[in-house]
Amino acid sequence: MTEGAIVLVSGGMDSLVAAAISLREYKPYFLHIRYGQRTEQRELKAFIDIADYYKVEDRMVIELTHFKKIGGSSLTDTDMQVPESLSKTGIPNTYVPFRNANLLSIAVSWAEVIGVKKIFIGATDEDSAGYPDCRKTFYQAYNQLIREGTRSGDIVIETPIIDMNKIRIIKLGTELNAPFSLTWSCYQNEDLACGKCDSCRRRLKAFKEAGVEDPLIYMDI
Amino acid sequence: MTEGAIVLVSGGMDSLVAAAISLREYKPYFLHIRYGQRTEQRELKAFIDIADYYKVEDRMVIELTHFKKIGGSSLTDTDMQVPESLSKTGIPNTYVPFRNANLLSIAVSWAEVIGVKKIFIGATDEDSAGYPDCRKTFYQAYNQLIREGTRSGDIVIETPIIDMNKIRIIKLGTELNAPFSLTWSCYQNEDLACGKCDSCRRRLKAFKEAGVEDPLIYMDI
């Protein structure tokens, strides 16, 4: 029997490629978490489209309300503005405080109950926006936390693309026939991608440098 | 200016004593998390009563829906039965998988946004029911996770009663005039405490051994 793996699928291109990698070895359990971010409806659609594409039966969609209450990020607080340039230094205001720790704890709770031992997340350290909860050392610490704080102690977070930059991720996704056309990356819009926010710019730049055509349609470029 | 501390206040006696300890030094931010447990209404009342008693203005109540979806615990799955005896070995079915990691991640997110550096939780290692997420080593690992995965890296989880047994906790709470009459410990009922579940039995036994009268009224003892 194939072993199972929970995959955190946000609907973006990194989690798509992490999912594509997991599917080579594991029976998938797709987990999507809405947390009050600006484009949550569009990201949910991307999740459903990707799960349908891969014919994944076991899926869970969770809604968190606390990030909107807590605020402090331009992704969850609409009074803050999403920056329209690639950040060079520091942590941009799109950082949702300790978000990935919150998301992983849900995945671990689910894994404990269904007896799954692997959790895939498409975090990238090399080419991330500087978010502290995307660092490789954060995931090492998380695995230690699981060893100490769970019943069996043997669930492991897998970060297969943590050392890849976006160009490498696009090339690998293309090799694996990952459906980039179904993903959503824009932080700002839900209809046409803005092409201007930090996330759109990173994506556009990477597709261009990878020599692959981005199948998304953008507003004004 | 007094520094702030977030206190996880479930409404039980351990978190009450942790709160009483924190109040000696810090300006309190009380956090209560409902997660679909059987007695969540009654626990919310206990939280409000305790927060009112201490005149705490900064409070946040969060509702999580995923533990009920995930199941696997008699506290969140009403088809499972809460055991009516003190468990001697192993982890009882009242264990909610990786619950405290979920709760702490919310507290850390809030702390990052409001700039608070301490988070108090009334976990007990010595006298707990054997839950893995109550172990001292779990909290050490959590502090490491915070160092790696937050913006400032300097938020610390404080577990002031981790080495105390329930008798010691009751004695300390009594010294601090902590209002035990406002707390709720029963896993089963919301009107009168059942006196039979694991949690009631632990509480009753500890009050008796501490030589302190338990101000709660029980059903059938």
Image (spheres, coloured by chain):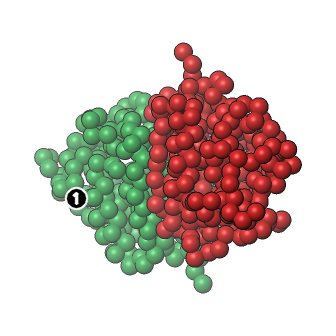
Chain colours: A red, B green
Q: What secondary structure is marked by label 1?
A: loop
Q: Residue at x 39, y 42 (%)?
A: B69
Q: Is residue B137 above or below residue A64?
A: above
Foreground of the two, B186 or B68: B68
x and y percentages locating residue A109 in the rendered image: 49, 40
Q: Residue at x 59, y 43 (%)?
A: A9
- Asked whether, in this view, residue B90 is left or right of residue B146, the answer is left
| Residue extending farthest left | B220
**Residue indicated by mark 1:** B216
Which corner quadrant holds the N terminus of chain B? bottom right
Please give the chain letter of the residue carrying mark 1.
B
x and y percentages locating residue A39 in the rendered image: 56, 59
x and y percentages locating residue B18 in the rendered image: 46, 62
Q: Amino acid at mark 1?
A: Leu
Q: Is residue B8 above or below residue A123?
A: below
Whether residue A59 appears in this view of the structure is yes
- Asked whether, in this view, residue B26 is left or right of residue A164, the answer is left
Q: Is residue A26 above or below residue B50?
A: above
Neighbour class for label 1 at 10 Å: few (<14), some, many (≥20)?
A: some
x and y percentages locating residue B38 in the rendered image: 28, 48
| Residue extending farthest bottom | B1
